[in-house]
Amino acid sequence: MSQRPFELDPLFRAITALPGVGPKNGELMERLIGGPKVLDLLFHAPVDFIDRSFSCPVTHCPNGKVVTLEITVDKHFPNARKSQPYRVRATDESGAISLVFFRANKAWIEKQLPLKQKVIVSGKVEYFQGNPQMVHPDAITKPEERDLVEAIEPIYPLTQGITNKVLRKAMHGALEFIPQLPEWLDKTYKKRQNWSAWHEAVRALHTPELETELSPMHTTRMRLAYDELLANQLTLALMRERQRKINGRSVLPSKTLRTKVRDVLPFTLTVAQERSLSEIDTDMEEKARMIRLLQGDVGSGKTIVACMAMLNAVESGAQAAMMAPTEILARQHEQSLRPWLEAAGVRYVTLTGRNKGKERETILHQIKNGAAQIIIGTHAIFQQDVHYHDLALTVIDEQHRFGVDQRLALSNKNKGIDILAMTATPIPRTLSLTAYGDMEVSKLDEKPPGRKPVETLLIPTEKLDSMIEGLKRKIKDGARIYWVCPLVEESETLDLAAAEERFDILHSIFGDRVGLVHGRMKAAEKDSVMEEFSKGDLDILVATTVIEVGVNVPEATIMVIEHAQRFGLSQLHQLRGRVGRGADHSYCFLLYSGPLGETAKERLSIMRETEDGFVIAEKDLELRGSGDILGVRQSGMAAFRLADLAAHGELLAAARDDAKLIISKDPKLESARGQALKMLLYLFERDQAIKYFQGG
């Protein structure tokens, strides 16, 4: 197994090796920059800068401008009352200025500003009763250190406990660690783009001197974004190449079994479903292994397409497996598939973490001897002790929970098995290239006939009471209601408090017909509340955002989303997709508390205008940038540190073409550029892709 090149070692040192970063700071900083390494800090880009190079006579300084002054300390005016400011009078040849400190430490100020001494101060000048003053100067130092202050100071995103000063000091140290690395870019492309070398670009990122240098379209940022996108696309290209080399098997389209299923379907397949199915059939018939993503909006009918694909495997005498991310979804797939599989006479089992002892042993035995033709379950179906008789196809539901790394692990475990991944999260094209560039994509871009649109209404919180009165009337008519409380700053405790409080209020109005589900409940508890709601024993289900993608209760016709302005568009769309699944008219109430910012306003109005998940996903990317559109934190998807997919779409396309070309010419990266590209993969921690070279 090859080791990471030693030239990169300085970048992989702990940030606690940097000046001013102790264990406590290190912990805070690690959370802020998303990792414990010097490299993570170098990838933390500034969002603004302050130019401290402007100087002026104190009495002629412009109001509100940041200036750097050389002044002599005249007199201290401490204040016995803590609530009153401590003032220091200082002068230059033009006149006097007051330096003002609140909640001041007298000893510290006397040390910083010794009487009759010259000092350099930098900060914003404001006028109070016609006289210049500087409240809490940003910097105070000796005249011989003027150069250090009179620089351009980058401003970084910060977290509580980390100041810009602390971060800059650490960054100063980090810049010393940057090695000169061999160039991995194509020479002609680099020259045409007018890009500098990697080490120069990283330095330039942290020393902006002009407003334009903060733009994602500036050459420095473009160069660094391209490196990140190239590492991503090269990993996917290597995966694809490897998958193609693993021999699959040719599986013919099912005729007999499919006909039996079509005979009992109460609907006919849409054009999009038929098209996707024929793409899947073509892939499965080929010798090469299928790796295909089936993308379809909520309710576009992915399950029946997956069922028809699995029948190909069964009719050829092999097995098929369907894996869902949670117990609830696995059980739900079983319910959906049951009538179709029974009509076709196909034997199936469901295996989740809940099956224990004898029951589990029986299921494992049926999987091993081939009695079970279709296996449905959670990731439990791929545990060590699960042995298949002859597995030909794996269907993975909610693919965005299984990122590139999880796919690599799965493909290393199974030799030559066709994979059909499914997601109900419509993904913008650029994002799907970075997340699923190793897969072919089929799209279900039309809804099955008979689906009624969901009426979406914006309701200010002031009208909450009258909305609740309306809900009472709807419940009398048999309606079932989801009530979703938002994430509060990523904190489960706060989320839970918000949901419990709402539950208590609704419980006092509606009594025991209200249930609650949240992230801290055990899976079995969650399932049993969901089941009560499904069966109609509850009218209202209060939930944090754990109502899983794919939860199916056709009788639920109303979705209330509290503080809707806090959710991203894709998430609002996913939640709305929980209703409108039956024949009754459905509603989605977006509760908001104003005043709304521009982005929130636009987000909520898009929700009212369209139900097309693909349109919504593109808009979401525009409004939010690529960072968290798929809920990166809980998905296995790569989050980009330097690339912004909303801005860098063209770079992504170029990186994709470049990666394809590299792999076709130099599949093992053995040329000089190939060696440099291995360095790039290590830099972005794509070590898993490099294992392929050893694995052959």
Image (tube, grey):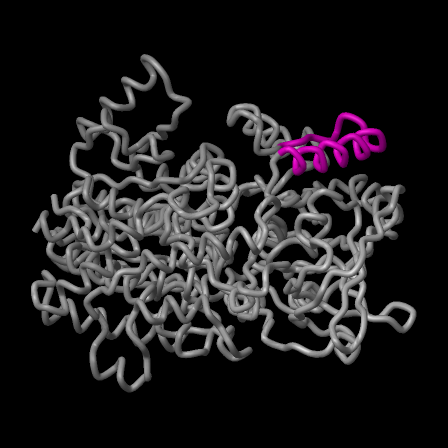
To which quarter of the image does residue 479 belong? Answer: top right
Q: What is the span of residues highlighted in magenta in the rendered image?
A: 493-517
Q: Is residue 308 left or right of residue 483?
A: left
Residue 37 image point, x, y percent: 37, 47
Residue 596 image point, x, y percent: 76, 62
To which quarter of the image does residue 128 belong? Answer: bottom right
Q: In the picture shown, does residue 96 fall above or below 544?
A: below
Q: Residue 615, can we see it?
A: no
Q: Is residue 627 magenta?
A: no
Q: Is residue 214 left or right of residue 555?
A: left
Q: In the picture shown, does residue 278 fall above or below 255?
A: below
In the rendered image, the quadrant that contains the N terminus is: top left
Towards the viewer: 684 or 147: 147
Residue 673 image point, x, y percent: 14, 69
| Residue at point 52%, 79% (across, down) | 212
Task: Point out the residue furthest to the right here.
Answer: 129
Q: Main secondary structure of the magenta part?
A: helix
Task: Point out the residue furthest to the front here.
Answer: 116
Q: Is residue 515 magenta?
A: yes
Task: Point out the residue furthest to the bottom here.
Answer: 192
Residue 451 image point, x, y percent: 58, 58
| Residue at point 67%, 48% (across, down) | 111
Q: Residue 652, can we see it?
A: yes
The number of discs equals 0
Q: Is residue 278 left or right of residue 131?
A: left
Towards the viewer: 235 or 23: 23
Q: Is residue 87 left or right of residue 338?
A: right
Towards the viewer: 454 or 103: 103
